[in-house]
Image (spheres, rainbow, N blue to C red):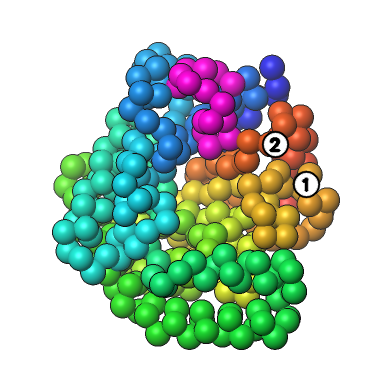
Amino acid sequence: MWKDKGQYSFSTCWNIKRHQTGSEMINEIRELGFRFVELNYNVTNELLSTIEPMIERGEIGVSSVHNTFPHVADPDYGTDSVLLGFDDEEKRQRSIDLLIRSAEYANRYGAKAVVVHPGEVPFDYNIDNELKKLYNEQGHESPAYTKLWGEMIERREAAAGHYLSRIGDSLEEVCDRIDAKGWDVSIGIETRSRCYQMPTLREAKTIFDRLQGARVGLWYDFGHGMMMERMGLYDNARDMEAIKDNVVGIHIHETVGLSDHWCPYVHSGDMEYFDRFLPIIAAVPVKVYELKAVCTPEEIEQSHELLLAKLAGLPA
């Protein structure tokens, strides 16, 4: 049994593919010292059948659930989708209803937030894959990368306002419906891992300015933020100032190059870059580790101890 992790939570994305039953999955996370979990979007009703009794008995707390929850196989409503920004009104309403369903589960489990990937600027093909391939093979300053990046940005910026408006409409309806039901659940729109996906930190600020007082905030995924900074989409240290008071939850992980979900400090060996996120980690109410399956218990423990030591060194 590893050290107690207190208020920190842990996403089931780490071990969901290793288990046939939900209770086994949760018990493995409990052995790491976590009292809370984030139930991710691959959790099925079958897995929930053995997790829910554990929640009811108080054996595990739920910090958050990740939309679409429980798992929906249709990719139109999955994690890489236009989702809340759909122009097709039927699809947009279905996306809203599924997010409300996720919030209903969060409320039932005593979770404080729902993590949602709100949408994207659609492209005819996965331009992000092409850009990452060029980044890794030729570098982000290469002519090929620079040319394709320019094409992506031009299309993204031309269409972003339209999709931001649709996403804002959808979130306004979601928040109104949650308020009407009296649920104490926040919606966290997550920083993303592909350059055409929304929101950037500045796009998130636009949404928060529009929906002031609504129970919507940023779900700051630090690893994704690192990836997008390296690719050239935004600057975390600069842009986080605008949204730091709107963060409702975080995904704690680090990016090595453009590969994400690694243990902070441990896998990169960089003892400084991740420090920029420490004030937000200290301040936010919901803190969730979101790590890949290859991260070992020993690495997770070492990373957490390093993080706690860093946080203890922050000025009061």
- Left or right: where does residue 90 sit relative to residue 188? left
Pick whichever, 284 or 261, lies toward us: 261
Which quadrant of the figure contains the N terminus?
top right
| Image disc number at residue 51 | none
Q: Which residues are magenta?
A: 10-28
Residue 6, picture quadrant: top right
The quadrant in which residue 85 appears is bottom left
Q: Is residue 101 left or right of residue 119?
A: left
Residue nearer the viewer, 129 or 161: 129
- The reply to whether callout 1 and callout 2 are in contact (CB within 8 Å) is yes
Query: Is residue 15 a member of the stretch shown in magenta?
Result: yes
Q: Is residue 101 above or below residue 28?
A: below
- The residue under the point 45% across, 69% down is 125
| Secondary element at tag 2 | loop
Q: Is residue 292 magenta?
A: no
- Measuring 46% from the left and 19% from the top, which residue is drawn there? 21
How crowded is the residue under tag 1: few (<14 C-alpha within 10 Å), some, or many (20+)?
A: some
Sequence-wise, the earlier of marks 1 and 2 is 1
Circle 1 SS class: loop
| Amino acid bearing label 2 | Cys
Counting from the top left corner in percent of width and height, residue 72 is at 32, 41
Residue under label 2: 295
Q: Which residue is mark 1?
A: 267
The majority secondary structure of the magenta stretch comes to helix
